[in-house]
Image: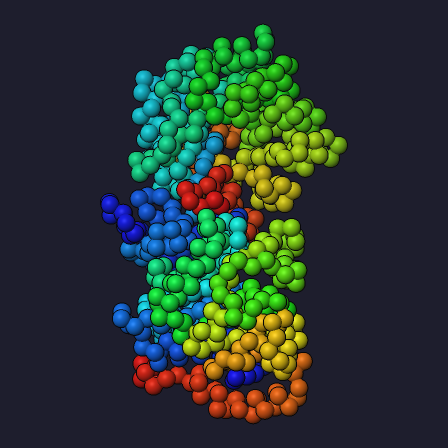
Amino acid sequence: WRRGQERYSPVTQFTQCRVLREHRLQREDLWVRDGRILDPEKLFFDEQGYADQRVDCEGSIIAPGFIDVQINGGYGVDFSQPSEDVSSGVSFVSQKILQHGVTSFCPTLVTSPPGVYHKVLPQVKVHDGGAQGAGVLGVHLEGPFISAEKKGAHPERFLRTFQSGGIEDLMEAYGSLDNVAMVTLAPELAGSQSVVRELCRRGVTVSLGHSVANLSQAEEAVLHGASFITHLFNAMLPFHHRDPGIVGLLTSDQVPAGRTVYYGMIADGIHTNPAALRIAHRAHPSGLVLVTDAIAAMGLPPGRHTLGQQVIEIQGLHAYVAGTKTLSGSIAPMDMCVRHFKHAVRMHEGSVCVMGSLFYVFDGFLV
Amino acid sequence: MKLIILNDYDQASEWAAKYIRNKILLFRPGPDRYLTLGLPTGSTPMGCYKKLIEYYKMGQISFQYVKTFNMDEYVGLPRDHPESYHSFMWNHLFKHIDIKAENTHILDGNAADLQVECAAFEEKITAAGGIELFVGGIGPDGHIAFNEPGSSLVSRTRVKTLAKDTIMANARFFNGDLSKVPTMSLTVGVGTVMEAKEVMIIITGAHKAFALYKAIEEGVNHMWTVSAFQQHPQTVFVCDEDATLELRVKTVKYFKGMMHVHNKLVEPPPSLSKKN
């Protein structure tokens, strides 16, 4: 209700709930009107309004939607498959992942030949989410400009290096950078600096991964604008005390003032040992971002399924490159990752919610 | 005056809250009969507000037919600033109870014309039938609301420049940064509060002891504006032990000796006992 309004917009007050504000869970009521979060103080003083209905949450947490910046598909849909109707596959997954609490995501494409990018990319558009499915923030292009030594499950024959002038190679491989939110590349590849700079200039997040870069190479990439690390620990050189490699970015003193290096972590209980999760978290808690790196098989029963140009096999909670013991990706949904992370790090719930949600800006509530 | 002395802050807060609770219950407010209260902000009344919220949640009282008038507000501080008195009242009282927004009145420190805002506030009080019970605190310099030393004892709602003592005392709410504390405020006058039917001043803590001494054991003086209430027919001072540290032993003994009488004022009224 509000004073002097023409159209009746009921105000709902969620009580006995915990909300995420100022990086922690607080016992605060949540007020909503017309599907937007409301500042109750403004409602009270400006509009002399009050709640039309109250919902007792009995102590539950109301968390902001999770954001997954690395997800390769799910429920049988593989984002790297050059189908005729990619957008309906994306819509299907976006609707399914709502039940995991994910409200925004970056459909991720693994290393593929130019033909696949040219066919798939024009069909995936940035758009807001809603009741029908999670929003698409933009595509995450993981490869093909990555290291052969750390390709993981990516097909070697489609890996590329920067030949001509850097960005031209990118445009030739991908076709277009419209609707691209993030690119994972290996910074030790010659010519990467200008590519990193150009991508950042265009508003694309540059993430370091699938790389054998040493710490200096990684720091140089950060200086040129790189701001993310793709699935920390996986597909990079292990931490070494004389050259910490990409992992060293977590405590590097070469990160420009005012900038943060964020890092994705797959907390599915398989890709990273809980002790490693804890080391990363303790070293740089504010940079931690939970990702699923989920593959098409997430949500499907055990067996063989297709990922990019390869076949993978599900055994229990593990997904391997068929015939090998190389991890192919995760099949743990985001809410499972959040809970597993909380348990592994033995943390307060509020901090974990922050890590699942990169952004926590609400209309009317700046958290 | 009645000088009520409790052991500590929590007990003083509870006594004050029960007094207000009983006031509401015995007044029996209704749609044609609103109870008007004057309210303070700051750390002193927080315990009292907590208790009032408890009594509301237990179903003992309702604020549906209660009108409130706050004592003061900073000038120039955005209304939604965490340290504004609007924010204080919302977070520490209004959002927890069933009071209607249109029944609350807080001076607008961002009004286009501050004089007009102050005059309008006085008119609103008159229109509401005057204030039944004005609750207040005391500053370390003996001020009531923002009526700093030197304020006229018959003053009305107006703009006041804050004294150095007050700015320093408030700096703790602005991260200790003196430059961030507002220097001006809108405040009800001493005369405005004197017109209330009853006045209750809550004073707790050793740092307020000297001000309390000046207010009740020395003469009426515009340098210690709370002293004006020596000339009000119905004043209650609610204190903890520490606040009485500068008083004469005789004064303290006299009023402590009357606690068994004064405590009757906070016993649950028959209507409440029947409910429970």
Furthest residue to the top?
A164
Query: So how many labels did they put on this image?
Result: 0
Residue located at (52% from left, 67% from top):
B155
Front-lying residue, B109 or B46: B109
Horizontal side of A126 relative to A356 (left or right) equals left
Residue A143 visible in the shown view: no
A40 lies above or below A127: below
- Say which quadrant the C terminus of chain B sits in: bottom left
Residue B143 visible in the shown view: yes
Q: Position of residue B254 (x, y in %)?
A: 59, 91
Q: How is the image coloured?
A: rainbow
Q: Position of residue A340 (x, y in %)?
A: 49, 46
Residue located at (63% from left, 27% from top):
A222
Q: Position of residue B149 (x, y in %)?
A: 62, 67
Furthest residue to the right?
A242
Residue located at (62% from left, 88% from top):
B251
Horizontal side of A191 relative to A57 (left or right) equals right
Front-lying residue, B107 or B172: B107
A131 lies above or below A45: above
Front-lying residue, A69 or B53: B53
B70 lies above or below A146: below
Q: Position of residue A127 (x, y in %)?
A: 37, 28
Residue located at (49% from left, 12% from top):
A171
Front-lying residue, A120 or B108: B108
